[in-house]
Image (cartoon, rainbow, N blue to C red):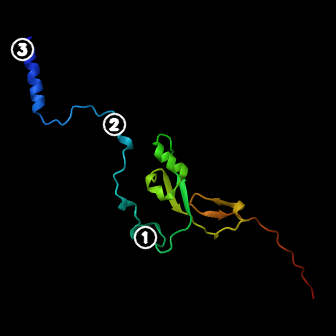
Amino acid sequence: MALFLGRRSAAWQTLAKSNLQSLTWTGWIRHSFTKSRISESVFQPRPEDHEKYGGDPLQPHKLHLVTRIRSGIGRPYWENKIIQDLGLEKAHQFRHLVRIRPLKLPHGIPTEEDMSDTFINSKGELIIWRRLKPVEEKAIELS
């Protein structure tokens, strides 16, 4: 019995001499939802971005197409709240869940009467589906 206690105390002594900081179990910490450590400079616009994606930095696009590419299921409550509020000033917090692209207007800005005949195609273009109007028949004069 004394030999057993001697071995046990020797094990505790070697454990005490080692440079362990803590013996507490940290498995209860939820690591997947910790705050991002990405600096804010990453989210600032750069001139290279305008060359890569097209566009003029002095005249930015007025309309943007926001598409959800991932579901909010399984995401933390604060990201789901941001998605519900959809404040674009907070887009860097949920940018991994959506894709933001400039909306292209190949037919120009639609009027109020054209809004019912518009749709957005897969390329991010706002297409105006114009209805054909009957052609006026002109009388041909024979002289």
Mark 2: few/some/many CA within 10 Å (<14, 14-19, 20+): few
Q: Whole-Å distance between the Cαs marked 1 and 2?
A: 43 Å
Residue where numbered disc 3 is placed: 3
| Mark 2 or 3, nearer chain start | 3
Q: Residue at x 16, y 35 (%)?
A: 20
Q: Residue at x 50, y 70 (%)?
A: 60
| Distance of label 2 from label 3 (alpha carbons) | 40 Å
Q: Is residue 121 left or right of residue 2?
A: right
Q: Amino acid at mark 2?
A: Ile
Q: Nearer the viewer, mark 1 or mark 2?
A: 2
Q: Earlier in the sequence, mark 1 or mark 2?
A: 2
Is residue 117 visible to the viewer in this orientation of the structure?
Answer: yes
The quarter in which the C terminus is drawn is: bottom right
Tell me the kind of residue under disc 3: Leu
Quarter of the picture containing the N terminus is top left
Residue 56 position, x and y percent, is 48, 73
The amino acid type of the residue labelled 1 equals: Glu
Is residue 69 visible in the rendered structure shown here? no
The residue to which callout 2 is attached is 29
Q: Position of residue 8 (x, y in %)?
A: 11, 20
The reply to whether discs 1 and 3 touch (Cβ–Cβ < 8 Å) is: no
Local crowd at mark 3 within 10 Å, few (<14), some, or many (≥20)? few
Going 13% across and 37% down the picture, which residue do you hit?
Answer: 19
Numbered tag placed on residue 70 in the rendering: none
- Please tell me whether mark 1 sits on a helix, a strand or a loop: helix
Q: Residue at x 12, y 30 (%)?
A: 16
Q: Quadrant of residue 32?
A: top left
Residue that badge 1 annotates? 51
